[in-house]
Image (cartoon, grey):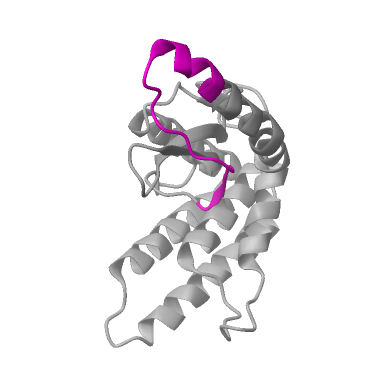
Amino acid sequence: MIRGEVGWTVQQIVLRPSRHAPAVRLDAVVQFLATPRVNGYTCAVPLTGAWDEPASVDDYEPVMAAMTRAILVQGAPFLDRYGSLDGYLDHLRDQAAPDPALGVDWLDMNTAEELTYLHLVRGDLAAAADAAQEAERSADEDRRHPIPSLWVQRGLDRVRQVMAIARRNPDEARSLLARNAASAAAALALPEPTPGAGFPSKGDGR
């Protein structure tokens, strides 16, 4: 179930099969569409409750009522908090916070890439450049491993390409990211992103 319009982000309530089939659970999910990693997301919260498939038509009403309560009480506030670009930035900043327990003070490539693109979408080239440096650092750390991860290098290559365009013409880079978002929406069988909330219309390079 999609909440609101699809733009740079999409807000969804997603059905998730539980470990005890045929029960299902619900997740509230926000996904930033400008990145190519369409089959995964990090901004999500599981809603309390699990429901079996009703045995009869009459049994659907209480199940749907319980699901609706979970969505309104738990899912909607989460989507309100993180569904906008500013809210998603808060999520990424939480992801980027150092974890002393792990002894890690650098970002993973996925977070660095998303931060780079999100700052570009928001028009903050300086912050995007800082995030791109975190992507470089992530790749440097990965190269220390006996077998570096190919996906990390591919992420760095994308960040370098987008930043090279952004330094020359930020509007062109933003237009490229808008095309990424449109492609991601199509791959996820979502409606085409619509103008609004900063998402450019077709032919608009901003």
Question: Horizontal and vertical percent for residue 43?
Answer: 57, 49
Q: Which residue does the image show at 38% across and 27% down from the upper left? A: 53
Q: Foreground residue, 94 or 152?
A: 94
Q: Is residue 31 magenta?
A: no
Where is residue 184? Give x, y as percent.
Answer: 40, 36
Residue 180 horizontal/vertical position (percent): 43, 38
18 w.r.t. 154: above or below: above
Could you tell me residue 63's position as x and y percent?
52, 24
User: Magenta segment, which residues?
Assistant: 42-64
Residue 124 visible in the shown view? yes
For the question of whether residue 204 can be seen, the reply is no
Residue at image point 33% right, 64% down: 151
Q: Is residue 40 above or below residue 95?
A: above
The number of callouts visible is: 0
| Position of residue 81 in the picture relative to residue 188 (left or right) | right
Q: Quadrant of the C terminus?
A: top right
Q: Give the residue at the far top of this rendering.
A: 58
**Above-or-below relation of 155 to 89:** below
Residue 62 drawn in magenta? yes
**In-image side of 60 versus 76 (left or right):** left
Q: Judge from the rendering whether residue 54 lies leftward or rightward of residue 199; answer left or right.
A: left
